[in-house]
Image: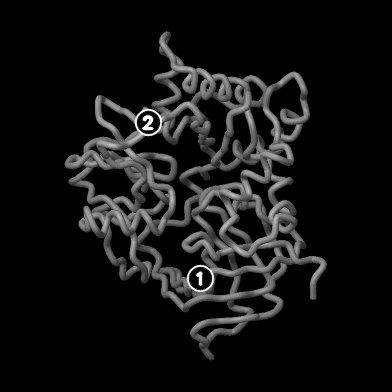
């Protein structure tokens, strides 16, 4: 059953006018898992419907802000064994859909510069692939009319097979000098590094091993773009209630990538063969190395992070997954903390 809101959608609350971005494809019956993105602020640098807003990007700061000002939107989930942000369905004022945004801009004769760029970007993808107007959407700040002069272009592609086909064609599109879509240059990668990994212990050299190969991000007419791929509903892994997760602490692991075919999607995942456990806090004797099957992330920065047969160093949260099909295994979740990482380590022991 498809949720009323999925990854890429945004939610505005009835009271206070808070705007959240939806995370994941599976949600509880009574609420949508989503994270605060914009909040009304008289000193904010964004304007929408005569109301000023501020944006919060850092995940930790989002929690701190909500706990202090709107604690009703933070809850502990026994099913996921963690604290989450979310909006009860009864408290939703409206849901913003990327497909609706694209169709609205397509019909409009009065577009802002950012809206025009986002629409042109979508049209280039459509005209240079087998993509149709029903397979694409525009999300992010442009969708909720809170964009600024330097705002990114955030695009959603819907459909498993379509997404893989677009990803394959992106390389030729980027290599075509007549099309103004390109990868970042060295200076832009350096800025990207400061934003994504500057506060971590990842070196720029290690950062670039993965980033330079990624196709879903780059520049369009000097504006940053990011493409997010969403699987077809028939490929979603059941319902939210089908799974139970248990937190087993922090893990550092070396592993080999067995299957990276789902690395382009959000959420992204990688099938792995664990090679060596480096650290587990707190340590648990009940965990066997061969029970760790997967790396998963709901954060776009871990998409296209590694390829098949690549050896990686991983640092993240270890959790046990229990499903109604009685399958049990462990997976590593990346993206909840700034320290989380996945780096190529082919040249290390």
Structure colour scheme: one colour
**Residue 265, horizontal then vertical, whole percent:** 56, 47
Q: Seen from this angle, which residue lies furthest top?
A: 109
Closer mark to the observer between disc 1 and disc 2: 2
In the foreground, 333 or 294: 333
Per the image, label 1 sits on a secondary structure element best described as strand
Q: Which mark is residue 65?
A: none
Q: Which mark is residue 146?
A: 2
Q: In percent of the image, x 63 and y 40: which residue is there? A: 216
**Residue 4, horizontal then vertical, whole percent:** 32, 42
Residue 101 position (above or below residue 324): above
* Distance Cα–Cα, label 1 vs label 2: 33 Å
Q: Is residue 214 left or right of residue 34?
A: right
Q: In percent of the image, x 54 and y 41: which residue is there? A: 228
Q: Seen from this angle, which residue lies furthest front?
A: 43
Q: Earlier in the sequence, mark 1 or mark 2?
A: 2
In the foreground, 4 or 193: 193
Q: Is residue 282 left or right of residue 42?
A: right
Q: Which residue is mark 1?
A: 317
């Amino acid at each position: 059953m498809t949720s009323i809101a999925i990854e890429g959608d945004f939610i505005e609350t009835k009271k206070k006018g808070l705007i959240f971005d939806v995370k994941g494809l599976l949600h509880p019956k009574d609420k949508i898992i989503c994270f605060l993105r914009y909040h009304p602020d008289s000193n904010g640098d964004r304007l929408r419907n005569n109301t000023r807003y501020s944006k919060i990007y850092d995940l930790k700061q989002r929690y701190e802000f909500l706990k202090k000002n709107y604690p009703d939107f933070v809850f502990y989930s026994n099913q996921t064994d963690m604290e989450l942000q979310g909006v009860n369905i009864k408290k939703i004022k409206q849901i913003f859909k990327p497909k609706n945004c694209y169709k609205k801009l397509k019909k409009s004769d009065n577009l802002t510069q950012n809206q025009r760029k986002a629409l042109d970007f979508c049209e280039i993808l459509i005209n240079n692939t087998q993509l149709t107007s029903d397979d694409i959407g525009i999300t992010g700040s442009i969708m909720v009319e809170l964009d600024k002069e330097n705002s990114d272009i955030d695009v959603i592609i819907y459909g498993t097979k379509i997404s893989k086909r677009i990803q394959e064609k992106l390389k030729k599109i980027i290599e075509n000098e007549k099309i103004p879509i390109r990868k970042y240059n060295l200076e832009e990668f350096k800025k990207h590094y400061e934003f994504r990994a500057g506060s971590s212990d990842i070196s720029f050299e290690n950062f670039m091993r993965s980033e330079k190969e990624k196709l879903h991000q780059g520049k369009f007419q000097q504006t940053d773009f990011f493409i997010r791929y969403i699987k077809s509903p028939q490929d979603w892994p059941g319902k939210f209630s089908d799974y139970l997760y248990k937190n087993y602490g922090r893990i550092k692991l070396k592993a080999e990538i067995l299957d990276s075919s789902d690395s382009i999607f959000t959420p992204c995942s990688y099938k792995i063969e664990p090679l060596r456990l480096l650290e587990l806090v707190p340590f648990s004797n009940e965990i066997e190395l061969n029970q760790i099957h997967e790396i998963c992330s709901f954060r776009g920065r871990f998409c296209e992070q590694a390829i098949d047969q690549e050896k990686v160093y991983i640092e993240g949260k270890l959790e046990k997954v229990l499903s109604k099909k009685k399958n049990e295994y462990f997976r590593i979740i990346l993206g909840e903390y700034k320290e989380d990482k996945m780096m190529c380590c082919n040249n290390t022991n």
